[in-house]
Structure formats: structure tokens, C-alpha cells
Image: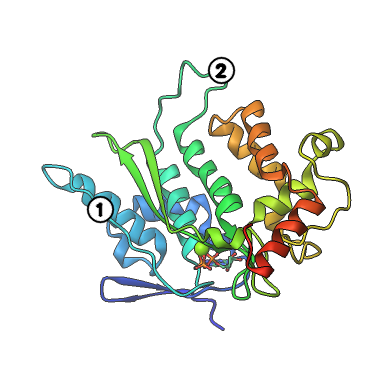
Amino acid sequence: MADTFYTNAGCTLVALNPFKPVPQLYSPELMREYHAAPQPQKLKPHVFTVGEQTYRNVKSLIEPVNQSIVVSGESGAGKTWTSRCLMKFYAVVAASPASWESHKIAERIEQRILNSNPVMEAFGNACTLRNNNSSRFGKFIQLQLNRAQQMTGAAVQTYLLQKTRVACQASSERNFHIFYQICKGASEDERLQWHLPEGAAFSWLPNPERSLEEDCFEVTREAMLHLGIDTPTQNNIFKVLGQGKGRESWERCSCFLQEGGPP
Ligand SMILES: Nc1ncnc2c1ncn2[C@@H]1O[C@H](COP(=O)(O)OP(=O)(O)OP(=O)(O)O)[C@@H](O)[C@H]1O
Ligand SMILES: [Mg+2]
């Protein structure tokens, strides 16, 4: 009721999912306020306090020391959201001045790091009973800083992708977002190339009528482009996802599965 979504419990920050947009809580101005504060821990509890404290811990020692933030909670608690917030925070406070000279469109490294989110989520998230955008994998994100505390790179390791979801979904749940994105967002030409007839129903893609904000194909494509996955490579990826998945083959495969035969 008080719109207070963060509180401290010892060295742990407890975050409550507000289940509504609270834009003023994540503004760049607020990020800068926490970043500039002499003692950020004295400000209201916030995910930016954790971000800033770890950022300072890296540099405050004679030798830089790696810092880890563990984001945990039940499905729908807001882990992915919180990780995104932290990445945005570091993209603002640890922005590097250098851009990639060799690249035609000079793309800042921070932007590429943020662009990894829509791609990871399109291919690894799905609508479940508990969360419309549920991560079906775990991830370890490493952000790398240079001695000047600027972001110089990132690495993402993923764990335990729920691959079985491709062929089997609980009722009222969906397959991975990317399948719905290509079905809903492909142009007429692409539909032909990728064997996705207009209006086709696929038995492995249940509940397509649910329209989610995660179904935005353009956002995924744009993010892939920014990550250096060019249009021909993207086409090949989408062709693989769509190929041979016309109504008949999808249905034949799921029949086999139901009968316990080879998929
Ligand atoms: N701080 C927040 N402000 C506004 N909305 C939020 C916030 N945190 C979470 N949400 C909302 O709750 C939804 C679920 O959060 P999120 O996807 O981060 O959960 P999760 O913990 O990653 O769950 P899962 O384990 O299923 O992946 C988000 O899509 C978003 O709509
Ligand atoms: Mg998640």
C-alpha cells in the first residue's frame, strides 16, 4: 500500500514484485543519485544500492576483487527483472567511452550487453501458469570491467534449458516465445521460406491466441542484429525453427510422442 518494494534484511535486499510499472523507481536520474551518493546504503533500500556497493567493492581495494550478486526467488518473483535492472544500472554507471572502430555502426558495448536480454528471453523463456515470461533456464552473467571501472565485455553462461518444452507443454502453458514470434511476425515472403503457412495451427504451439508483450519478433530481430547476428544468419536460424514444422509434420511428431514412438 505504501508502494515500498525494497527492504533490507542484513546484507540481503528483499525485493517485492509490484506487478505494475513503477517507472520513477528505475529512472536514470535515480541511478545517478545512488551512484553519486557518498553512502548509498543510507538511501532507501534499492537494487541500485546493491549494484553500487558491489561496483565500489571492486575498486576500493588495492587489487580488484570479483564481486557476485545472487538473485534468487520463486518463479514470478522478479529475478529476471532485477537482473535486467542491474545490467541497466551498470550500463549507465560503467559506460565505456570507446566504441568499436571497426564496426560500421559504432555500437557501444553496454548496448550489446542489454541486447542480450531480448534474445535470451525469446529463445529461453515461455509463458507458464505462474509467469507469462518465465525463464526456462538458469544463467550466470559475467560483466567485465577494466582498471578504470569501465565495462569492457560480458559473458553469459546458461544452465539447464528446459528443452522438453519444445515437444511437451502443460495445459494453459506455451512453448518458447520465439516460435510464436516467428509465426506472428514473419512477412509473407518469410512465411514461404520458413514453411509457415498463414493461419496454420501447430499442435506443439498451444495457446497462440494469447497475445503477450513478449511476442514482439521485431525486438528479437533488432537485438540479434545489434549482437552481430546478421540478417542471413538470422534467416537460417528461423528457417531451422520453422522448417519441416508445417502442420502435418508437427502433428505427426506429436502423434508419435503420444503413442510412445520415435519423434
Ligand atoms: N520491479 C518490478 N517492477 C515492475 N514489474 C515487475 C518487477 N519485478 C517483476 N515484475 C513483473 O513481474 C513479472 C515476472 O517477473 P520475472 O520474469 O522477473 O520473474 P522471475 O523471478 O524471473 O520468474 P521465473 O523464475 O519464472 O523466470 C515481470 O514480467 C514483470 O511484469
Ligand atoms: Mg526469469
Q: Which residue, as the protein is rendered here, is positioned at the far front?
A: 261
Question: In the figure, residue 253 lies in which quadrant?
Answer: bottom right
What residue would you read off at disc 2?
104
In the rendered view, does 94 fall on the left or right side of 59? right
Residue for point 73% across, 44% down:
244
Residue type indicated by callout 1: Gln
In the rendered view, does 191 fall on the left or right side of 257? right
Instruction: Describe the element under mark 1 as helix, strand or loop.
Output: loop
Instruction: Describe the element under mark 2 as helix, strand or loop.
Output: loop
What residue would you read off at disc 1?
67
102 over 199 or under it: above or below: above
Residue type indicated by callout 2: Lys
Q: Nearer the viewer, residue 106 or 216?
A: 216
Nearer-N-terminus badge (1/2): 1
Q: Nearer the viewer, residue 1 or 188?
A: 188
Question: In the figure, residue 166 lies in which quadrant?
Answer: bottom right
Colour approach in the figure:
rainbow
Which quarter shows the C terminus?
bottom right
Work out whether residue 134 can be spotted.
yes
In the rendered view, does 43 fall on the left or right side of 19? left
Residue for point 35% across, 56% down:
51
77 over 143 or under it: above or below: below
Q: Nearer the viewer, residue 107 or 180?
A: 180
